[in-house]
Amino acid sequence: MDQELLKSVSRSFYLSLRFLPEAVRAPLGLAYMLARASDTLADASTAPLVARLDALDAFRGALEFTASSSQWRTLAEQCAKLPCEHAGEARLLAQIEPLLRAYHGLDAALRRELYTVLDTIIAGQRGDLVRFGYASENAPQALLTAEDTVAYTYAVAGCVGEFWTSVCALQLREFAAQPVAELVELGRQFGQGLQLVNILRDLPADLRAGRCYLPAEELSAAGLSVEDLLRHPERGRGVFQRWLAQAEAWLGAGTVYVRGIRGARLRFSVALPRRLGEATLALLKQKPPLESPLRLRVGRGTVFACMISSLLEAKDFLQVSRNSPNASVL
């Protein structure tokens, strides 16, 4: 796997991935890069909407077990036509054929797991484009119900928590210290929590682009329209606080998840994004993003502190893991 390419299109995930055991590092990294490639296609905002939808459809087709190499080339041609401002993402799209070759070279069980999660993610991206494809600051759109917001967090990240757990169960003998089915559920909630933190942090930028992931029914109940959120952000505080509490509850599932798995490296790789999510959540509590002129983001010092704390958390089970017959999880 091209580590420099992966590093150029990720931040916290790259930090987590590099510590994982090799048995899961490769399939998880491949899944991330394929998902990031589809996200790049969906986000090519200067391209016509129909071109982005066609590219996502071609992507899903190229992932099918029966897909031919000609379908890979067709997708690569569509990727080359879509504008891409980020250098790392441009390199990623240029590597789509080798990535697909690696994906189709996986054994059937692993490829099935990758297909399931990528199919869910791409379906969510496609639905997002259909819903917000013609939205703008002057004509904003919002998700309609709380169920829609929850479904969106699942399609983007909750399914990834399930996938992560399933791949570990396939590749690492006895990695789970509690039933895998329980870990799958915890992983789903944890993934949704991380995504919800991102949604809340990015509210101002999304609103300026005409997208609102807070449900319209809750805004309406508070006497607000989507347009009101940018003009009168303090009036949306009640809705924001409700979803902030939901994000905190979902992130809490990550704490339980860490305790339910074996292996210091695995535990660190889960603890780190959870602690980064918690640090971002603390910032959101101090400075609600709609009421702050600055884009909130944890600094390098906080990232380093989260890494140290995650290492200490993972170290709790380090000696136990070394003495375990299941040394492969290390």
Image (tube, rainbow, N blue to C red):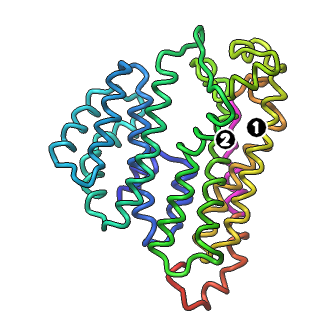
Amino acid identity at mark 1: Trp
Name the amino acid type tagged 2. Leu
Q: Is residue 164 above or below residue 156?
A: below
Residue position for label 2? 196
Pinpoint residue 184: horizontal percent, then vertical percent.
59, 63
* Residue 145 position in % (x across, y down): 67, 30
Instruction: Name which quarter of the figure residue 113 lies in.
Output: bottom left
Which residue is rendered at x = 66% and y = 60% of the image? 186
Using residue 232 as the reference point, say whether residue 67 is left or right of it: left
Q: Is residue 94 above or below residue 145?
A: below
State the residue in front, 93 or 91.
Answer: 93
Queried whether the magenta region covers residue 213, the answer comes back as no
Left/right placement of residue 194 relative to residue 168 reads right
Q: How many marks?
A: 2
Residue 243 numbered tag? 1
Could you say which quadrant of the image residue 153 lies in?
A: top right
Distance between the alpha carbons at the discs numbered 2 and 1: 8 Å
